[in-house]
């Protein structure tokens, strides 16, 4: 920026037909950018190419206006961004030559979990280009299914456009079904964010290990253990749509928790925290000597919050599993 200014942007749909006329295809989201003060002189737009392959030479930036579309040659291309100099605003997005070779790109595996209904739960797996905007994906998925919850796992992998991939679980279990058997990676998917694979779980499971393989070579391109129990936690949001951390969630429910949790439930929760190594034996014993339930609850939640994000998430997850009614009352489910 050359000076102060208020910059706003939103993600809009590409006109695929218009791009095809110029022998181009999407290589990133299309951003509609505005700055009333006109003080922005350079943009850094995210790309998902692997620069060492030489694929970046096929990138350009589409500048879309009501009068037409021009393609800007990048001022610089870094490992993660395409840099262009600008003098005005409208819509900008990274594009790729339509006939460019099929290089692998940086991709992402996103997981969305639907809690059990009649003992059957669903884990929807999305294969997407690595430079999609996660918040945009989450918003679109939430509009389709408000009960669906995003599960955070390391998403990074490298996938070939138009290549077919196979998703599998690490153990053979008749209670797990994955459909379809294979699916093609669509590297131009910056709009619809549809499910690529669906994992159908017939029994309650704490976790599942998933593997993504190249159909032709059987090479594993992504693997992760997915903890489904943590998906039972609904993360409250602050104004502006930003997620709260687990520590902030506990802080927000501090008073209603210590007032509403029952004595037996509190002891069961502390026992489970101790059993899973979240609190030590001496800390568990220190909670027992508190004079009443309110002091014990205040001591317990404060102790867990002081241990940080992971411990706080464990406490929230255990509470959701042990006492669904209280968890709903506190806004955790």
Image (cartoon, rainbow, N blue to C red):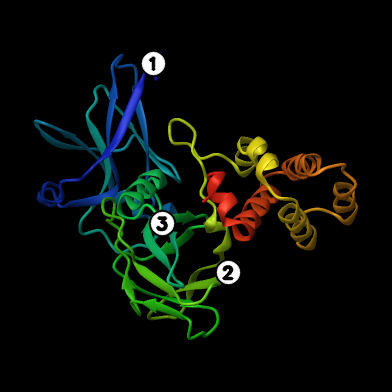
The alpha-carbon separation of the residues under discs 2 and 1 comes to 50 Å
Residue bearing the label numbered 2: 207
Residue 256, given in percent of the width and then of the height, sits at: 63, 38
* Mark 2 → mark 3, Cα distance in angstroms: 17 Å
In the foreground, 316 or 105: 316
Give residue 2's mark.
1
* Label 1 Cα crowd, 10 Å radius (few <14 / some 14-19 / many 20+): few
Q: In which quarter of the image is residue 253?
A: top right
Q: Which mark is residue 148?
A: 3
Image position, residue 139 (x, y; %): 35, 46
Q: Is mark 2 on a helix, strand or loop?
A: strand
Quarter location, residue 245: top right
Q: In this view, does 98 lie to the left or right of 237?
A: left
Q: Nearer the viewer, mark 3 or mark 1?
A: 3
**Residue 122 image point, x, y percent:** 42, 68
Q: Which residue is drawn at 42% across and 55% down?
A: 50
The residue sitting at 64% across, 54% down in the picture is: 319
């Amino acid at each position: 920026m050359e000076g102060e200014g208020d910059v706003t942007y939103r993600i809009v749909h590409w006109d695929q037909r218009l791009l095809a006329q110029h022998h181009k295809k999407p290589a990133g989201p299309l951003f509609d950018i505005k700055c009333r003060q006109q003080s922005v002189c350079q943009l850094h737009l995210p790309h998902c190419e692997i620069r060492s392959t030489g694929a970046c030479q096929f990138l350009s930036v589409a500048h879309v206006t009501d009068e037409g579309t021009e393609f800007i040659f990048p001022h610089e291309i870094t490992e993660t961004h395409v840099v262009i100099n600008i003098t005005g605003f409208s819509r900008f997005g990274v594009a790729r030559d339509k006939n460019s070779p099929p290089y692998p790109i940086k991709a992402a595996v996103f997981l969305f979990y639907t809690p059990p209904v009649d003992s059957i739960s669903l884990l929807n797996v999305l294969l997407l280009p690595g430079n999609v905007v996660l918040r945009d994906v989450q918003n679109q998925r939430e509009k389709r299914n408000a009960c669906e919850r995003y599960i955070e796992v390391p998403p990074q992998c490298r996938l070939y456009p138009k290549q077919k991939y196979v998703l599998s679980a690490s153990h053979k279990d008749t209670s797990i079904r994955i459909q379809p058997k294979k699916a093609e990676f669509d590297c131009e998917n910056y709009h619809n964010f549809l499910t690529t694979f669906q994992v159908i779980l017939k029994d309650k499971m704490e976790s599942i290990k998933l593997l993504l393989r190249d159909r032709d070579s059987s090479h594993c391109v992504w693997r992760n253990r997915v903890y489904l129990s943590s998906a039972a936690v609904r993360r409250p949001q602050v104004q502006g749509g930003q997620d709260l951390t687990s520590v902030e969630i506990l802080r927000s429910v501090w008073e209603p928790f210590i007032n509403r949790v029952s004595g037996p439930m509190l002891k069961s929760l502390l026992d489970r925290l101790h059993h899973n190594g979240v609190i030590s034996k001496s800390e568990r014993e220190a909670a027992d000597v508190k004079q009443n339930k309110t002091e014990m609850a205040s001591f317990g939640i404060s102790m867990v919050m002081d241990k940080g994000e992971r411990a706080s998430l464990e406490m929230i997850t255990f509470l959701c599993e042990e006492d669904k009614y209280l968890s709903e009352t506190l806004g955790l489910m």
